[in-house]
Image (spheres, rainbow, N blue to C red):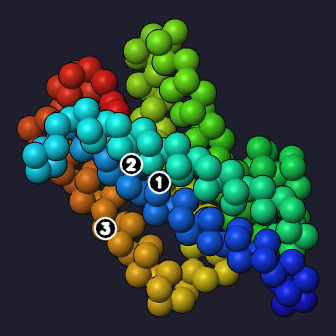
Amino acid sequence: MNGVTSSGAVWYLMRGSGVVSLLLLTTVLALGVATAGRLPLGRLPRFVTLSLHRSLALLAVVFLGIHVLTAVVDPYAGVGVAAVAIPFLATRSAFWTGLGALSLDIVAALIVTSLVRRRLPARLWRGVHWLAYAAWPVALLHGIGGGTDSREPWMLAATGAACGVVGAAVLWRLTSGRARGPAAAGGQLA
C-alpha cells in the first residue's frame, strides 16, 4: 500500500477516470447500437442520438487519456510508456494491464478511422468500427482483473449496470428486424 499512499492523488485519479471511462464507453456503445439500428429514443430525432454518441465518445477519450496518463505517471501502477501501446509489457499485472492496452489500441484505431472517415472506403471504416464490440468487453475485463475496486459493492453494481446496458442494446440489435447487418441500418454503423 506504500505505492498507493506515495502517489495518492494520482492513484485516485487513475482509478476514478477508469470507472468514468467505462461508464462513458458503455453509453457510447449503446448509443452507437441505437443509432445504427435506428432505435427510436422517445421523440429524439436520429441526428440528436448520433451527436450525443459522438460527443460522449470524445468525452470518453478525454477520460481514457487521463486514465492512461495517470497510469504512466503513478509508479505503483508499473505502466511504462511502451506498455500503453504494446499489450502485456507492464511490470505489474501484465495480463490485466495488457488487456487495457489492447482495448486502447482498438479505440485508437476507431478514433483514427473516424477522423479520416471521408477518405476511407465505407466498408473499411465500418469494419474497423465493428471492433468497438471487441474493445468494450476487453476494457471491462481489464477493469475487473486489474481494478483495485472491482470487488467493492458500488463497482460491482456499476459493472453489472454496464453489462446490462450493453447486453440489452446488443440483444435488441440482434433480435430486431433491423439486425440483418449494416445495409439494413442504412449502410453504416454509428
Of the residues shown, which amino acid type is indicated by label 2? Leu
> Which amino acid type corresponds to the residue marked 3 in the rendered image?
Gly
Q: Check the image and report above or below for 48 versus 1.
A: above
Distance from the alpha carbon under mark 2 to that under mark 3: 12 Å
The amino acid at mark 1 is: Leu
Q: Left or right: 49 with respect to 136?
A: left
Write the residue at 18% across / 32% down: 180
Residue 21 drawn at (x, y percent): 55, 59
Counting the numbered discs, the total is 3
* Residue 123: % across, % down: 40, 16
**Going by the image, does 174 lie left or right of 70?**
left
Residue 29 has which mark?
2
Residue carrying label 1: 25
Q: Are marks 2 and 1 in contact (CB under 8 Å)?
A: yes
Label 3 Cα crowd, 10 Å radius (few <14 / some 14-19 / many 20+): few
Q: Residue at point 8% right, 38% down?
A: 177
Q: Is disc 2 surrounded by few (<14), some (14 to 19) or many (20+) residues within 10 Å? A: many
Q: Are marks 2 and 3 in contact (CB under 8 Å)?
A: no
